[in-house]
Amino acid sequence: MKHHFNPKLIEILEKTFSHLQQKLKVISDAYWELAPEKRYRIRLAAFAFGILVLGFIAGRLTTVHRVIKTEQMEKEMVVDKSGMISLSMPGITLNPEIYRFEKAGLQSVPQELRVPGRLVFNAEKGKLLSARVPGRVERIFAFEGAPVEMGSPIVELYSPEFNSAQQEFLLTYQTVKILSESNSLTNLLADAKITQEAAANRLRNLGFAESDVLTLEKTGKTSPNLLMRSSIKGVVVKRNVEPGAIVVSGEPLVFLADPKALWFAGNVFEQDARLIERGQPMRIHLEAFPNREILAKVNYVSPTVDSQSRGILIRADITNTDGSLRPDMYANGKLQIGTTQAIVVPQTAIVRDKESHYAFIRTGPENYRRMIVKGFDFDGNRFAITEGIEPNVEILVKGAVLLNERFAKQE
């Protein structure tokens, strides 16, 4: 059988072959004109390229095509406008050791209002030591923070008026003593005793203790300086004078407070003013003692709103029995303003995402639903759901974060 070739095709092939020969000759001439080092590098590159091509061909010839069977489970997710997500997972059974469901039930829980604040001294139990006569501060016995006992000297004050009051008392005392020796001057004796008692009261009003009056009677010697003593057992909170200062009558010298009598002072926002009243119970937690809870009752609600913070001051009495609490410690109060019905679950049942809270319920053997819920933290370990879930449904109380990850993979 004869084969007939197209003359034009033969002519094109011959021209192409001739052109290739010319190109190869040019490349060959250029190659041999190169320096021996460059020709060596070209040969190495060509050898490496040849090995790469051979490896690729060998890999293609030896590739084993394995057929892997995969079992695909049909998962269906439904998202409604409210953000609620339903997920069906056929063939998947959640491990009960990781995921635990319980039947949701309503219970009455206290409705609380958060009140930030701090501890302060109880001003009603404190005492302000002020100058009752004009004079000069000679000595200060107790400075800020110093503990004092009842009757302990605090300030020593020199006062000419105080010295005159002592002389007046001694004069009336001697008068009473002389008149007491005469039985015929009973009317004058009664008047003298009244004058003596008035002089003694004047000394007491100036700060003289009863023991000081008795000592003055016994010795008949006046004290050069007035010792101003503490009327309570407490600590020196604030001092307003320095040794050598000249003071006038009524000038405050030292403020004393009882460290065992404290106040919780907190602020409530004005929009919550209608919810607060005296006598409401409060739970107080301190940053310094996170595991300690103090129970108290509101004993004061300010009649005004602070112009700067826009808050309303409330106070509650705190008894610092062991002395571990200190004024100016930060505290957080939870004021009970009523009760409400809620589904109480562990904190492990709630997933937090920015401002939203989610919980999961089981709607079927293999069907689950993520719900948006509202509520508040309850006693630090639990969460009270007030909206979003109806009672008597199966709610996930353990493993919510892990199940939420499964939902996230399907979104």
Image (cartoon, rainbow, N blue to C red):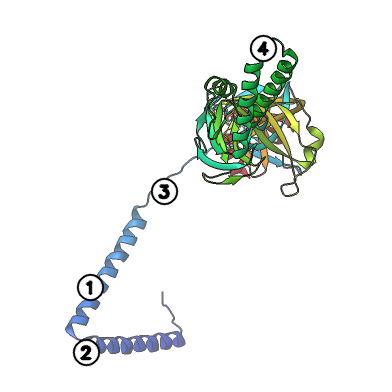
- Say which amino acid is labelled 3: His
Between marks 1 and 4 in the image, the one whose residue lies nearer the viewer: 4
Are circles 4 and 2 on residues that touch, CB within 8 Å?
Answer: no
- Say which amino acid is labelled 1: Leu
The earlier-in-sequence mark between 3 and 4 is: 3
Q: How many marks?
A: 4
- Say which amino acid is labelled 4: Ser
Q: Position of residue 152 (x, y in %)?
A: 53, 27
User: Mark 2: few, some, or many residues within 10 Å (few <14, many ≥20)?
Assistant: few
Q: Which residue in the protein does label 4 denote?
A: 182
The earlier-in-sequence mark between 4 and 2 is: 2
Q: Position of residue 290 (x, y in %)?
A: 54, 31
Q: Where is residue 3, by image quadrant?
A: bottom left
The earlier-in-sequence mark between 2 and 1 is: 2
How far is disc 2 from disc 3 in space, using C-alphas? 49 Å
Q: Which disc is residue 44 wearing?
A: 1
Q: Quadrant of the C terminus?
A: top right
Residue name at image x 60 percent, y 31 percent? 257
Considering the numbered disc 2 on the image, is that residue within a helix, a strand or a loop?
Answer: helix
Residue name at image x 53 percent, y 25 percent? 149
The earlier-in-sequence mark between 1 and 4 is: 1
The answer to whether 310 appears left or right of 41 in the picture is: right
Q: Which disc is residue 80 wearing?
A: none
Q: Which residue in the protein does label 2 denote?
A: 33
Between marks 4 and 2 in the image, the one whose residue lies nearer the viewer: 4
Q: Where is residue 129, by image quadrant?
A: top right
